[in-house]
Image: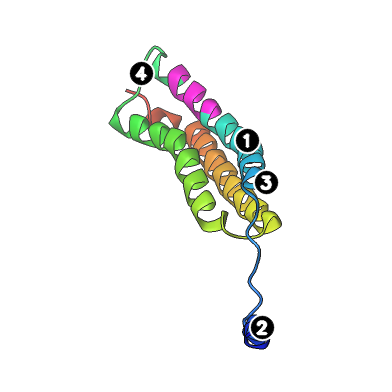
């Protein structure tokens, strides 16, 4: 009986060990702080533009609210894609998502600098 159990265990494919929950939480919190910084930066820019003398039109609200919501969406997608992977792959996926957020934020800032009048009421 023990020979059959040993043979079955030896012939089974070696499973990958899951990343411990504490490591996933630590990596998520570390990268989550950077995503939160991008969110608060976008929110501060939205408030500054909305409370200005001209306010925002509908297009301005759409663009700047999208800049606020985008870091949340990017973090959720990156977390969903990477949380079952090895810790370094998970960190790499979250970093890639953070890079996408940074590029999106730079695009919003560049658009607001060049075509800022189209965002204002």
Point out the tag, 2 or 4, that comes first from the N-terminus. Answer: 2
Q: Which quadrant of the figure has residue 51?
A: top left
Point out the tag, 2 or 1, that comes first from the N-terminus. Answer: 2
The residue under label 4 is 55
Relative vertical location of residue 37 with respect to residue 24 in this rendering, above or below: above
Question: What secondary structure is found at the residue carrying circle 2?
Answer: helix
Left or right, 73 with respect to 103, comes to: left
Of badges 1 and 4, the one in the foreground is 1
The residue under label 3 is 23
31 or 118: which is nearer to us? 31
Question: What secondary structure is found at the residue carrying circle 4?
Answer: loop
Question: What secondary structure is found at the residue carrying circle 3?
Answer: helix
Point out the tag, 1 or 3, that comes first from the N-terminus. Answer: 3
Of badges 3 and 2, the one in the foreground is 2
**Which residue corresponds to the image point at 66% horizontal and 40% vertical from the top-left?**
26
Q: CA distance from mark 3 to mark 4?
A: 44 Å
The residue under label 2 is 2
Q: Are marks 3 and 4 in contact (CB under 8 Å)?
A: no
112 or 31: which is nearer to us? 31
Q: CA distance from mark 3 to mark 2?
A: 36 Å
Q: State the image coordinates of residue 120 (x, y, percent, origin top left).
A: 37, 25
Point out the tag, 3 or 4, that comes first from the N-terminus. Answer: 3
Farthest left residue in view: 58
Tell me, for residue 34, which label it has, or none. Answer: 1
Q: Are marks 2 and 4 in contact (CB under 8 Å)?
A: no
């Amino acid at each position: 009986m023990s020979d059959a159990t040993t043979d079955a265990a030896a012939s089974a494919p070696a499973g990958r060990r899951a990343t411990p929950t504490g490591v996933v939480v630590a990596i998520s919190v570390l990268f989550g702080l950077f995503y939160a910084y991008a969110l608060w930066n976008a929110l501060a820019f939205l408030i500054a533009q909305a409370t200005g003398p001209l306010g925002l039109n509908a297009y301005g609200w759409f663009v700047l609210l999208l800049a606020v919501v985008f870091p949340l969406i990017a973090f959720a997608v990156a977390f969903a894609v990477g949380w079952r992977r090895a810790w370094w792959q998970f960190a790499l996926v979250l970093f890639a998502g953070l890079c996408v957020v940074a590029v999106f934020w730079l695009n919003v800032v560049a658009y607001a600098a060049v075509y800022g009048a189209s965002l204002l009421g």
